[in-house]
Amino acid sequence: MTTPISRSHTNARMSQIVTHGDTIYLAGQVGTPGESVAQQTRDCLASIERLLAEAGSDLSHMLQATIWLADMADFDEMNAVWDAWVPEGQAPTRACGEARLATPDYKVEIILTAARK
């Protein structure tokens, strides 16, 4: 028996949420272009919380996060927001690197995988 795959908020290019079994994959989330790194991080994390809730999960079920910064010099600013957001003892595995994002106005992109509650 094949496990069904569910896709939400789908367009020709991508889906915001893909669920396979009890695993939830979120597309990369970005913040408001041109805002500070801290604000863009808060925006990303708010989108992640909303999408996880829609998919039947929450922060305590995070498995893995990939964070892309346009400039690694912004690592501490992003981490200050991230650290306040992650519930104590619930941190996912995580990688963070520097990359060119879709436009120069984006400073942070966060991709997250979680388990269903």
Image (cartoon, helix red, strand yellow):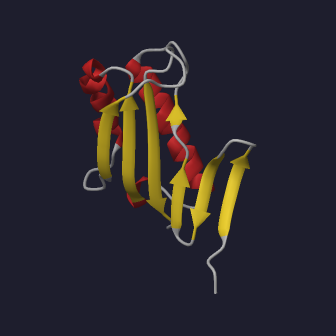
Residue 56 % position (x, y): 58, 61
Instruction: Report the side of 18 relative to 105 (left or right).
Output: right
Evaluate whether residue 40 shows in this view.
yes
Q: Residue at x 39, y 27 (%)?
A: 99
Q: Nearer the viewer, residue 25 or 56?
A: 25
**Does residue 55 appear in the picture of this structure?**
no
Q: Is residue 77 above or below residue 25?
A: above
At 31% from the left and 34% from the top, the residue drawn is 97
**Quadrant of residue 98 in the image?**
top left
On the image, the x and y values in percent for residue 39 come to: 44, 21
> Residue at left 31%, top 37%?
96
**At 45% across and 55% down in the image, what residue appears?**
113
Quadrant occupied by the N terminus: bottom right
* Nearer to me, 93 or 36: 93
Nearer to the camera, 69 or 13: 13
Lateral position of residue 7 relative to residue 81, left or right: right
| Picture quadrant of residue 83 | top left
Mark count: 0
Going by the image, does 93 lie left or right of 27? left
Instruction: Estimate the x, y position of residue 25 in percent, counting from the top left.
Output: 53, 55
